[in-house]
Image (tube, helix red, strand yellow):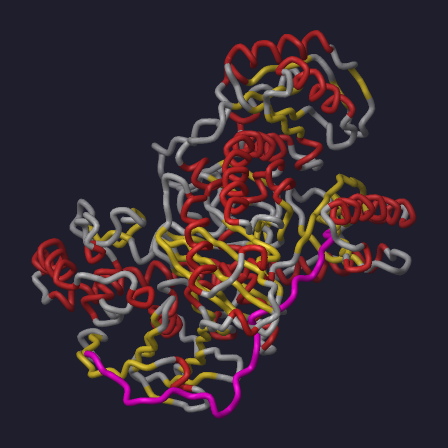
Amino acid sequence: MAIDARSTARSFRVGIDIGGTFTDVVATCGDGGVLVRKVASTPDDFSLGSSEGLAELLRENAILPEEVDVVVHATTMATNAVLEGKGALTGLITTAGFRDILEFRRVRVPELYNLDYVKPEPLVPRQLRLEVLERLGPGGEVRVPLDEASVERAAMRLKRAGVKAVAVCLLHSYANPVHEKRIREIVETVFADDVFVTCSHEILPEIREYERTSTTVVNAYLGPVMRQYLQRLEQRLGALGAGRSLHVMTSGGGQMSLRSAMNKSAYLVESGPAAGVIAAARTARRLDLPNIITFDMGGTTAKTAIVENAEPAKTSEFEVGAGINLSSKLVKGAGYAIKLPFIDVSEIGAGGGSKIWFDKGGVLKVGPDSAGAAPGPVCYGKGGTVATLTDAFLALGYINPRFLVGGALGLQAEKSFAALQSQIADRLEKPVRDAAHGAVTVAIANMVRAVKSVSTYRGRDPRDYTLIGFGGNGPIVAAMIARELSMSRVLIPPNSGVLSAYGLLVADHEHELVRSFPGRTAEIDPLELDAGYRALARQAVETLTAEGFAEAEIEVRRFADLRYVGQAYELSVPVAAGRPLVMAEIDEAYHQEHLRSYSHMSRAEPVGLVSIRVIASVRSPDQGARTLPGGEAGSGAPVTREVYFGPGPGLWTTPVLRRADLLGVASAGPLIIEEYDSTCVIPPGATATVDRWNNIVIELGN
């Protein structure tokens, strides 16, 4: 929705989200208006597409660069660097005897019955994993002093090998970082500061050697690449005059400053998908919908997450480099562990650019390979030759060949039909439309599985939730997915095609800090525990104030990571602040969380505390949200087009409307709602209306 920038308070916040096919740019201003621009992503240099998209948005809306107050960015660069093996050459310095911890990993495989499964190679080759003489005890006591000569030898060897990043992870350094700090000093002296160094106590001061080592290595591996990329982005935006305050989205759903992001690149993995979930959660909170399932489908992947009590589900167990992630809590062992906060998103390779193909057994498949931004689907006319899901959407009549991205991207329907005919329909011996519908049905089945992985597979009934669909292609298939799951309601927010970019602007600015604090809760002194929380809180608040925030606007929340004594993994529960700690209350909170997560608990079992953590955050303004006046509605006679809904419903002459045409009016499907950034399909048998917040509400009657 365009606004007249000259009539607003001249202060704009901009979100830039890079996807596999499009880069989305969203700007908001004080009156709730939203400006949107989509441009093709530039895989050779993603910062170029970001700066070009912002420049076009500013130019089209007569906004001066100096009127851009804040830019928040999300990128797939970190994930892609691991997937494509394009991180920095990295070395590891560790305690003598722990050189091969990256090889040992955990006894987990993602494919239980695949005897030929091969684990991915460590990010640091063995010749660059070096040991030094030192040893700390689990309480932080020095058992073997640091042999600085062994550190110097290791640093010199890594320098001669040409490494650009060094990860330092010593046994029990979470309890006492003194040796890691000294190793950093020696390494930086040997390299003359020409190296990116990550110490485990800085990125993850927690127990579990493999996860801590892996997280530290991933951060080091990504550090030089992400620092170079973010510096290039800063320079490009600075050249536009709009780079004064640049923040980056984290995988946990918060923002961090550019400088923090350069040092903590592991926090940026999966930053884009997190932004969409945050925006959907804001929408749910505004509508008093406590429980939702989000569905975000773009050009390359489809992502889904669960939001309960208006809070997205989070996990600290994530694996990057595993390809498609069908819920980190369910499938493990396929990638590189990162034990940092993530919004728990399940992801499958089913996007608009997903290729349609047949396996060796002749079974029709969709994805995970994608045509991406270049060459793109066949209908783009940019050299793509393999039929994709977008080509199927076009053949079925779901999308308008003359209105994608507001008409900026014309589609060549005849090429889609030809590709679908020769590659799919002829082999199936079906008409083109039936073949295209079959491909969509296969894709829907894959997406349903992703939704189940965050709901049904975790004891949640999706029928008790509202599905919120967004992304460039999410509104096309959201109602079909909901119908398969017997869900009764679907919500399509305004600007749904760029909702992740909008989510960047409503995400809180936050820092999360953790400290190992092992012991049975019955034996822990509440005063000592409170002192530990206070120390972490001071550190987090100091970080935010150093980034320019006032202490009065910073909110600090406390959490405890607990488990029954003898368990291998813990659950995180909130801990009340502002009053004396009561250990019995913390125990009870854990019992209830265990019951909610696993459907059983045992108050007779002793509870053990593993770590304490605090999240210090500054709330972002809820810009872009405004109610619509009751009289605002569309005008003019609707156009129609032929849309095919499958062999049963058949071909329907379907009205093509604007969102405003449904304001306060319940209309029966089938309907097509066309917008600049997405297309929404309301199938036969459903009804749709637009509420006062400009959301399309689809009732399926399941």
Q: Does 79 sit above or below residue 163?
A: below
The answer to which of 560 and 565 lies nearer the viewer is 560
Name the spot of residue 365 as percent of width and height, x first: 24, 53
Q: Is residue 51 left or right of residue 136?
A: left
Residue drawn where x is 69% and y is 61% of the image: 619
Residue drawn where x is 70% and y is 62% of the image: 592
The answer to which of 86 and 436 lies nearer the viewer is 86
Range of magenta residues: 615-641
Query: Magenta stretch mostly in which secondary structure?
Result: loop
Residue drawn where x is 41% and y is 65% of the image: 497
Name the spot of residue 395 as percent of width and height, x first: 18, 67
Q: Is residue 400 left or right of residue 629?
A: left
Q: Is residue 410 left or right of residue 349?
A: left
On whether residue 680 falls in the magenta region, the answer is no
Name the spot of residue 413 as percent of width and height, x first: 16, 64
On whether residue 620 falls in the magenta region, the answer is yes
Residue 608 appears in the figure: no
Residue 67 appears in the figure: yes
Residue drawn where x is 52% and y is 57% of the image: 15
